[in-house]
Image (cartoon, helix red, strand yellow):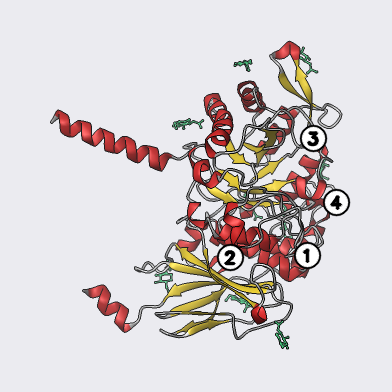
Amino acid sequence: MALRNLIFTAAAALFAAKAGAVDNGLAITPQMGWDNWNALGCDVSEDLLLQTAELIVDYGLKDLGYHYVVLDDCWSKGRNASNNNSLIADSSKFPNGMAAVADRLHELGLGFGMYSDAGKYTCGGYAGSLGYETVDANTFASWGVDYLKYDNCYNMGQAGNQQISEARYAKMANALNATGRPILYSLCNWGEDYPWNWGSTIANSWRISGDVYDNWDTYDSRCPCTGADAWNCGLPGFHCSILNIANKASFIVSKAQPGAWNDLDMLEVGNGAMTDAEYVAHFSLWAAVKSPLIMGNDIRTIAPADLSILSNAAVIAVNQDPSGSSAGRRWLYGINGSDPFVGPSIQLWSGSLKSTTGGTYSDMVVLLINGADETDPKAQRKQVKMSWEVRDLWANRMSTDEAAAIIAASTATGNVTTGYNATEVGTGRYNVTATSYAAGLAANDTLLLGNVTTTVQPSGTVTATVDPHGAAMFRLRAVPTAAVKKRDEL
Ligand SMILES: *[C@@H]1O[C@H](CO)[C@@H](O)[C@H](O)[C@H]1NC(C)=O
Ligand SMILES: *[C@@H]1O[C@H](CO)[C@@H](O)[C@H](O)[C@H]1NC(C)=O
Ligand SMILES: *[C@@H]1O[C@H](CO)[C@@H](O)[C@H](O)[C@H]1NC(C)=O
Ligand SMILES: *[C@@H]1O[C@H](CO)[C@@H](O)[C@H](O)[C@H]1NC(C)=O
Ligand SMILES: *[C@@H]1O[C@H](CO)[C@@H](O)[C@H](O)[C@H]1NC(C)=O
Ligand SMILES: *[C@@H]1O[C@H](CO)[C@@H](O)[C@H](O)[C@H]1NC(C)=O
Ligand SMILES: *[C@@H]1O[C@H](CO)[C@@H](O)[C@H](O)[C@H]1NC(C)=O
Ligand SMILES: *[C@@H]1O[C@H](CO)[C@@H](O)[C@H](O)[C@H]1NC(C)=O
Ligand SMILES: *[C@@H]1O[C@H](CO)[C@@H](O)[C@H](O)[C@H]1NC(C)=O
């Protein structure tokens, strides 16, 4: 009896340790929000955050799940020796202090994201948290912070293998946990020392590469590891293109799990240097591999076409799927015999989603990416073994006119009182504040399921014509066939 209890307890402890991961209850689906860095760099202020927050509400983005407003680098002004060396917010940028920012964001129903660095200095040269983990975590918690993006500059050589990096990042994990406040912990160590192997035990997400830039596929020597060496990139670099990061992600998709995600870096949608098709492909891929969806554009000047990409609930529903399993790359071909890692390529990603048919079979997401400079429909296909209903997840993309109306309905400076009136514009949009993605999927909401384009039979193929540098994204739902039914009855 005693022995059996002991064995049972040990098994339970093992299970808890495995299932627990970071165990702060956060990011059960990938986190969503906005961060100023990609568009605005160090140009941060209270006004920027609060104006952006009001627009996130006005434009219906909050009601699509974009929750965290994340302040990036360059907000502080040293440490306060008379107050346990705690960080001081720059009062010229944040005249009312950080707690006031947090309070206002919370009033709007949003979360407040903070930035620091597991080094002596931040990347912008401000005070870093290395050696100050406890006091900084306490400061963040006292301000009402809900999220920490934790960078890797000036790490004083405390890197080079998994154990050293893990130990450095675990200090902040423990300090955050000790505050008692649930704070989403987002590692930003650029994929150095394989954070996908150890990040899930201490954090909610980990960056897998050097910084993204607003570029589809240009090779840039500052971001090495373009080919099959991508899984083992000693030098993460920066200026990484969308397809470069996609390639790095392809090797480690299995590491994503509820509460712990591969972070492909913040979105570039709306920053101006890619085409609409490229932004569609970028957003689709980030969604399918369960990357956090953190908008990286200036919301104050968002163009209608970009708002409509970021507002595609059918694509977001793939990202927020309750099963929390990442799509993987099934194939990658070079066009006309080129090296697929370097030359133009086409690639197919797919993965399973929670069933919306109540049947034995999961739904599937299928994503075709055409990296070539011309349309090539013939090669863009996936063979199937049974019947599937094929639903196009971009069919119901909000029109540019509707997006423009939503933007116009809000005041230029952002005013929740006079802004976006959902009754007048934007009707028929999905609203996750009212109905979770899981519930909407379970109810077969077509805003999430997409429109049926065709049904493919066993041994048929899914074929799509994909724009150059674009993507087609489908949800496949199993259609019971006679054979399947017979098997089900056995
Ligand atoms: C701290 O960690 C423990 C053990 O993993 C967990 O149960 C608890 O929820 C965590 N608390 C916070 C605030 O993250
Ligand atoms: C430093 O801390 C002291 C003691 O809490 C406080 O009076 C002072 O205002 C702080 N200075 C700054 C610049 O925040
Ligand atoms: C003050 O700083 C020390 C050293 O970082 C830390 O151990 C302690 O918990 C801090 N106290 C508070 C109230 O943050
Ligand atoms: C492949 O090569 C053929 C023959 O040179 C050319 O006509 C075609 O445009 C190329 N296709 C792509 C996608 O580059
Ligand atoms: C959703 O659609 C599937 C397939 O048509 C059907 O089996 C299921 O009953 C529907 N669920 C609801 C809640 O309508
Ligand atoms: C998709 O289906 C909805 C509802 O049936 C319909 O209103 C809409 O026009 C369809 N969209 C396209 C692009 O066919
Ligand atoms: C928003 O508009 C309302 C009504 O015009 C006004 O009373 C309020 O002061 C405005 N709020 C801001 C923050 O400008
Ligand atoms: C929104 O617009 C509708 C239709 O014009 C109007 O009846 C309603 O009062 C408006 N709501 C707000 C909060 O302004
Ligand atoms: C979304 O739903 C929430 C909760 O029902 C509601 O307060 C909010 O106004 C809705 N948003 C829009 C844009 O309709």
Identified by mark 1, the residue type is Met
Image quadrant occupied by the C terminus: bottom left
> Which numbered disc, 3 or 4, marks the residue that appears first in the sequence?
3
Which percent across, then down, holds residue 366?
Answer: 53, 71
Q: Name the image quarter holding residue 159.
A: top right
Viewer can see residue 333 = yes
- Residue position for label 2: 314
- Secondary structure under tag 4 reads loop
Which marked residue is nearer to the observer: mark 3 or mark 4? 3
Q: Nearer the viewer, mark 4 or mark 2?
A: 2
Q: Residue at x 62, y 25 (%)?
A: 133
Of the image marks 4 and 2, the number of the one nearer the N terminus: 2
Q: CA distance from mark 1 to mark 3?
A: 27 Å
Asked if the residue at label 2 sits under 8 Å from ligand 6, the reply is no
Query: Which residue is farthest left?
Result: 1
Q: Residue 265, position in %: x, y?
A: 66, 51
> Which disc is residue 74 wearing?
3
In the depicted view, which residue is nearer to us: 178 or 349?
349
**Quadrant of residue 312 within the rendered picture:** bottom right
Q: Amino acid at mark 2?
A: Ala
Disc 1 designates what residue?
Answer: 274
Compare marks 2 and 3 and give the one earlier in the sequence.
Answer: 3
Q: Nearer the viewer, residue 192 or 288?
A: 192
Q: Looking at the rendering, which quadrant does residue 250 occupy?
A: bottom right
- Near mark 3 (Cα within 10 A), the count class, few <14, some 14-19 or many ≥20, is many
Residue drawn at (69%, 32%), measured in percent from left and top? 103
The residue type indicated by label 3 comes to: Cys
Label 3 and label 4: CA atoms lie apart by 26 Å
| N-term mark: 4 or 1 | 1
Does residue 18 appear to the left or right of 210 in the view shown?
left
